């Protein structure tokens, strides 16, 4: 399969430590034995810190977006370094470059692309553009819930949901002050528009990503508890 992974900065770069990048590199190299991979890296705490300072010094939101993109690309370079020869050596700066890099047979790692697009949205667009088989979004929560589980004890986790349900859930959650959703509204709309098969999952432990993808790619052999939410058409 051709798989796009949008790895949240909240897990890959919550703190800039080598173990996080090396752990993901080991899993990606294992997955690349059977699958072609394109990875989009988020910005994490460093991006938020830089953007907050930029806003405080008077930068507008487009400038802040460019700063965030730069940080995501730095995280991409760190993951490329951890992957070594298994990775394409440069993070592509747009979708066409990603497609060209994929022809190398290496794992392709990139960050953001243009202002106004989150890295999850970049992952969704890449999945459509490359005609990938699957989009995986490893994040800091274990799937999509009917409401913010930190605030609503009655929130129910979806094992499976439609893209339309995802959009409705994300929009409801995002509209509540202080709430966080595992998929941002723009990415959710792209997933709906392009009918992209997607998995949203807890990815703090990269081994979870390996297990979920191996489980997903071996239809008929799925066993145990599924560690995430499947988005289907």
Image (spheres, grey):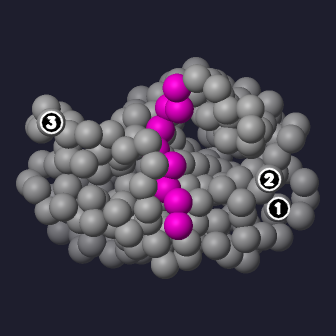
Above or below residue 18? Residue 32 is below
* Residue 215 quadrant: top right
User: Does residue 108 show up?
Assistant: no
Q: Residue at x 45, y 34 (%)?
A: 202
Above or below residue 58? Residue 150 is above
- Apparent side of residue 153 relative to residue 170 in the rendered image (left or right): left
The CA span between labels 2 and 1 is 13 Å
Locate residue 57, reporting x and y percent.
19, 62
Q: Nearer the viewer, mark 1 or mark 3?
A: 3
* Circle 1 SS class: helix
Above or below residue 232? Residue 15 is above
Outermost residue on the front side: it is: 220
Q: Residue at x 83, y 70 (%)?
A: 100
- Please state which of residues 171 and 121 is positioned toward the viewer in this rendering: 171
Locate residue 66, reporting x and y percent.
42, 68
Locate residue 22, reporting x and y percent.
66, 26
The CA span between labels 3 and 2 is 37 Å
* Circle 2 SS class: loop
Identify the disc placed on residue 154.
Answer: 3
Above or below residue 193? Residue 58 is above
Q: Residue at x 29, y 50 (%)?
A: 181
Stretch in magenta: 225-233
Identify the disc placed on residue 102.
Answer: 1
Mark 3 packing: few (<14 Cα in 10 Å), some, or many (20+)?
few
Sequence order check, earlier mark of 3 and 2: 2
């Amino acid at each position: 399969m051709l798989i796009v992974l949008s790895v949240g900065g909240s897990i890959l770069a919550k703190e800039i430590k080598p173990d996080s990048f090396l752990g993901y590199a080991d899993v990606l190299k294992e997955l690349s034995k059977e699958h072609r991979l394109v990875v989009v890296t988020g910005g994490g705490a460093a991006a938020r810190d830089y953007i907050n300072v930029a806003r405080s010094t008077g930068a507008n939101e487009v400038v802040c977006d460019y700063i965030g993109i730069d940080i995501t690309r730095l995280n991409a370079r760190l993951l490329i370094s951890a992957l070594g020869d298994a990775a394409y050596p440069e993070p592509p700066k747009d979708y066409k470059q990603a497609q060209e890099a994929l022809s190398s047979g290496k794992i392709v790692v990139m960050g953001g692309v243009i202002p106004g697009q989150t890295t999850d949205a970049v992952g969704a667009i890449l999945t459509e553009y490359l005609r990938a088989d699957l989009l995986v979004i490893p994040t800091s929560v274990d799937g999509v819930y009917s409401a913010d589980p930190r605030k609503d004890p009655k929130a129910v986790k979806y094992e499976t949901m439609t893209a339309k349900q995802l959009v409705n859930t994300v929009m409801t959650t995002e509209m509540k002050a202080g709430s966080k959703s595992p998929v941002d509204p723009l990415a959710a709309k792209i997933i709906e528009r392009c009918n992209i098969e997607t998995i949203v999952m807890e990815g703090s432990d990269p081994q979870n990503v390996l297990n979920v993808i191996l489980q997903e790619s071996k239809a008929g052999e799925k066993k145990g508890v599924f560690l995430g939410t499947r988005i289907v058409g």
